[in-house]
Amino acid sequence: MAGVKLDGAGAQKMKTIEEALKTLQTMHGLVERMAIEVKNQRGAGVLPQQVKRMATPLQGQLKGQFGMIADQVSAMILAAGRGGGEQIKVRTLREHVAQIRMALEIVSTKVKEQHAVPIETAGGDE
C-alpha cells in the first residue's frame, strides 16, 4: 500500500494554514484574557487593540491563498474596533475566532484531499 504526500502548492498552503492557526491561538488567548478582565469588572484595556494588531498581518498572510478566510479576519478587525459594550465585544470576538478556526480546519482538509500525490515505492508491494 503506497502512502501519499502533498505536492509543492499543497505544502505551501499547509504551511500558511499552520502559521495562521498559531497566530489564531495567540489571539484566542488574548480574547479569553479580555473575557476574564470584563468578567471581573476591570475593563478590557488595550486587549482589543492587541487583537487588531495581531489580526492585521494574519489577514494579509491569508489574502493571497484563502481570500474568504481573510475576509472573515477583516470582519473580526472591524468588530474589535467597534464601540459598544465590552461583554458584547468579547462574545463577538469569540465567535469570530471560532469561525476562523473552523474555516482553517475545513480548508486544511480540502488541501490534503486536492494536493495528495501517491508516494512511489521502489519495491513491488502487492
Image (spheres, rainbow, N blue to C red):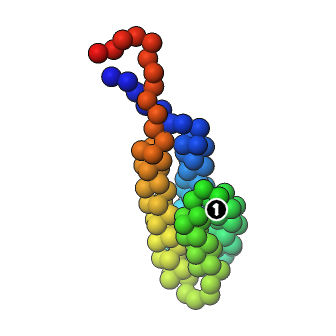
Alpha-carbon neighbours of circle 1 within 10 Å: few (<14), some, or many (≥20)? some
Residue 9, percent from left and from top = 58, 43
Query: At 53% across and 73% down in the image, what residue appears?
Result: 93
Residue 111, percent from left and from top = 48, 47
Q: Is residue 40 visible?
A: no
14 or 43, which lies in front? Answer: 14
Residue occupied by mark 1: 63
Residue 27, percent from left and from top = 59, 61
Residue 119, quarter of the rendered image = top left
Query: Height in image: 119 above or below 110?
Result: above
Q: Amino acid at mark 1?
A: Lys
Q: Residue furthest left?
A: 126
Looking at the figure, which quarter contains the N terminus? top left
Query: Height in image: 65 above or below 33?
Result: above
94 or 117, which lies in front? Answer: 117
Left or right, residue 111 beside residue 49: left
